[in-house]
Every structure is written in C-alpha cells, then in structure tokens.
Amino acid sequence: MNLNEHQTRGQLIDRQLEKAGWKLDDRTQICREVPAAYAVKEAHAPYGSIGSDGITDNCLYDEDGCVLAVVECKRTSRNPREG
C-alpha cells in the first residue's frame, strides 16, 4: 500500500477514529490543521517535549475541551518517526 498523506487520512486514520467513536464533523472533538504551538500549550506539555513548529493534522479534545491527543497523518511510504 502506497498512500499519500491525504489518502492515509481518508482511508486509514479517519476510518479508525470513527470506529473508535470520534465524530469527525464535531469541532468540539476534533480540529484539523491546528498550529502545533497551540496544541502544545493547550496540552500543558513540558516545554520542548514535542515539537512546536508547523501544523498538527488532527487535534483530539476531551469533553472539557482540553487537548487529549495529536494525530499526525503521513504517507504510508514514510517512516512515522520522521517530522
């Protein structure tokens, strides 16, 4: 399987998020293209624990509106540990 980032999101990641009960059209649960610096700040992550440059692909929020997780979409031919 050789999918680009957009295909990976649509065919793999979005399907798994929906299967896990996430509502992709509910912006209180999931926001796309969130600045990483905002996600780090909102998650109260220790400074420097994760990169703060660029844009996150998916930011997942708990019921209180706090960042619960960041999900990055990568093409399937790329090592997920690469930025």
Image (spheres, helix red, strand yellow):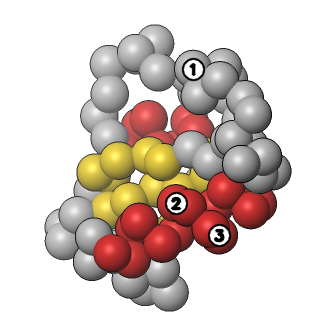
Q: Tell me: 31 left or right of 74.
A: left
Identity of the residue drawn at 56% across and 44% down? 72
The x and y percentages for residue 33 are 66, 57
Q: Residues within 10 Å of mark 2 (few under 14, many from 20)?
A: some
View extreme (left): residue: 64
The x and y percentages for residue 34 are 60, 54
Under circle 1, the secondary element is: loop
Gap between marks 1 and 3 measured at Cα: 20 Å
Q: Amino acid at mark 3?
A: Gly
Identity of the residue drawn at 41% across and 37% down? 41
Identity of the residue drawn at 56% across and 36% down? 37
Question: What number is the disc on residue 81?
Answer: 1
Looking at the rendered image, the quarter that the C terminus falls into is top right
Identity of the residue drawn at 32% across and 62% down? 61
Question: What number is the disc on residue 13?
Answer: 2
Q: Earlier in the sequence, mark 1 or mark 3?
A: 3
Residue on which disc 3 sits: 10
From what the image shows, is residue 41 above or below residue 60? above
The x and y percentages for residue 76 are 69, 41
Q: Quadrant of residue 22?
A: bottom left
Under circle 2, the secondary element is: helix
Gap between marks 3 and 2 measured at Cα: 6 Å
Q: Amino acid at mark 1?
A: Arg
CB-based contact (under 8 Å), mark 3 and mark 2: yes
CB-based contact (under 8 Å), mark 1 and mark 3: no
View extreme (bottom): residue: 25
From what the image shows, is residue 69 above or below residue 26? above
Under circle 3, the secondary element is: helix
Q: Amino acid at mark 2?
A: Ile
Q: Earlier in the sequence, mark 1 or mark 2?
A: 2
